[in-house]
Image (tube, rainbow, N blue to C red):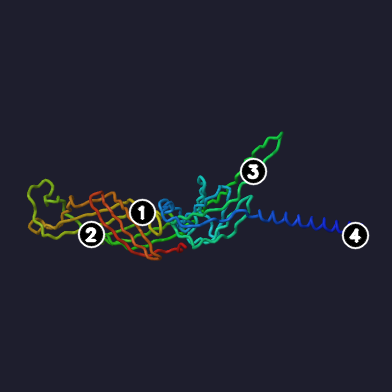
């Protein structure tokens, strides 16, 4: 009888040990992930992402998620995190447009994997994500009946932003320049990635030919107070050549500026009674330094341009162009 009772005591003690072991495992698993998402919502009146946008690798404005959590949290998404900013009491995450999932990690409290937003994020919009955190458990050391508080060391994970290299593109456009002496026709070429260079040549395809002398805008010749008679026939010559730099600003929109040389010449024809031939009108003739400033925009393969050109700051032209873009399309 005593042996049977002793055996029952051993069995009961074994079962108690197993029960305590299972309870300890359950307690450890309950602490595996001790935080949760308390709420996620759109902040319609918060313009942080609209006023100062952060752009992703595709040059698209990001959505901004403000996470109310300490800075020792780390995050990841299938589309990546463009930029992280640690603010007082919260973390700002700039995420690409269309992000749906967010994985949240903590070095002590575990991992909340693939939390799904209520709907895909929209660019330039600001959202709020609140986390429900466990109550902090102070780590204490007992020494001579004195409680010493031990500070927690916080590790911050920085995610570098990689800037995608833009593809090489060649722009070829036919241009039309308008000025007081009629239109000029030209060709515009630009080669660039984010920055590059361009050349532009334009001419009215005419020449004033040989001249017999000069006159001013009143028609008087040098050293003479007698104005010769003119037939009313005029000749105009106009050409410019400029080259310079071109820069990609945003969404296929480029700015270019350049310098070069240009000439705009006008000749008046005299009557036979005045000697005939053409006189170069010096007041209506300008040559020398030329400058050009303009913009270029591309829509898929089609490109258009508009610019202003001056010769010596005295003759001005407005130029427009249309052509094609050759190169790999940016995704």
The residue under label 4 is 4
The tag earlier along the polypeptide, 3 or 1, is 3
User: Quick one: label 1, few (<14), some, or many (20+) residues within 10 Å?
Assistant: many
Q: In front: mark 4 or mark 2?
A: 4
The residue under label 2 is 207
Q: Dividing the image into 4 quarters, which one contains the N terminus?
A: bottom right
Say what secondary structure mark 3 lies in: loop
State the image coordinates of residue 133 (x, y, percent, origin top left).
Answer: 58, 51
User: Could you say which is closer to the camera, residue 100 or residue 183?
Assistant: 100
The residue under label 1 is 256
State the image coordinates of residue 166 (x, y, percent, origin top left).
Answer: 47, 57
User: Could you say which is closer to the camera, residue 191 or residue 36?
Assistant: 36
State the image coordinates of residue 31 (x, y, percent, origin top left).
Answer: 66, 53
Contact check, label 3 and label 1, Cβ < 8 Å: no
Say what secondary structure mark 1 lies in: strand
State the image coordinates of residue 241 (x, y, percent, origin top left).
Answer: 31, 55
Q: CA distance from mark 1 to mark 4?
A: 100 Å
Q: Quadrant of residue 325?
A: bottom left
The residue under label 3 is 138
Q: CA distance from mark 4 to mark 3?
A: 48 Å
User: Could you say which is closer to the camera, residue 184 or residue 76?
Assistant: 76
Q: CA distance from mark 3 to mark 1?
A: 62 Å
Q: In front: mark 1 or mark 4?
A: 4
Q: CA distance from mark 3 to mark 2?
A: 92 Å
The tag earlier along the polypeptide, 3 or 2, is 3
Say what secondary structure mark 4 lies in: helix
- Residue depicted at 68% across the width and 35% down the height: 146
């Amino acid at each position: 009888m005593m042996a049977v009772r002793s055996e029952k005591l051993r069995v009961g003690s074994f079962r108690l040990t197993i029960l305590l072991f299972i309870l300890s495992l359950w307690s450890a698993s309950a602490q595996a992930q001790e935080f949760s998402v308390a709420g996620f919502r759109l902040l319609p009146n918060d313009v942080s992402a609209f006023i100062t946008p952060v752009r992703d690798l595709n040059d698209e404005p990001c959505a901004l998620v403000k996470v109310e959590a300490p800075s020792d949290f780390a995050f990841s998404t299938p589309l990546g995190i463009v930029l992280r900013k640690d603010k007082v009491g919260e973390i700002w995450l700039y995420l690409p447009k269309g992000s749906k999932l967010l994985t949240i990690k903590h070095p002590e409290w575990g991992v909340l994997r693939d939390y799904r937003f209520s709907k895909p994020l929209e660019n330039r919009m600001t959202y709020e994500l609140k986390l429900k955190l466990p109550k902090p458990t102070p780590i204490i050391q007992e020494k001579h009946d004195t409680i010493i508080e031990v500070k927690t060391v916080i590790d911050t994970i920085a995610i570098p932003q990689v800037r995608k290299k833009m593809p090489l593109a060649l722009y070829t456009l036919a241009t039309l320049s308008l000025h007081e002496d009629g239109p000029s026709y030209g060709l515009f070429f630009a080669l660039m990635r984010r920055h590059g260079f361009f050349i532009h040549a334009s001419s009215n395809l005419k020449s004033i030919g040989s001249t017999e002398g000069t006159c001013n805008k009143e028609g008087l010749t040098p050293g003479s107070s007698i104005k010769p008679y003119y037939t009313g026939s005029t000749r105009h010559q106009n050409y410019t050549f400029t080259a310079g730099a071109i820069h990609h600003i945003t969404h296929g929109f480029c700015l270019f500026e350049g310098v070069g040389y240009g000439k705009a010449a006008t000749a008046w024809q005299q009557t036979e009674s005045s000697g005939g031939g053409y006189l170069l009108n010096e007041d209506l003739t300008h040559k020398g330094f030329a400058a050009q400033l303009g913009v270029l925009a591309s829509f898929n393969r089609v490109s258009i341009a508009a610019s202003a050109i001056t010769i010596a700051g005295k003759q001005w032209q407005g130029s427009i162009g249309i052509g094609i873009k050759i190169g790999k399309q940016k995704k």
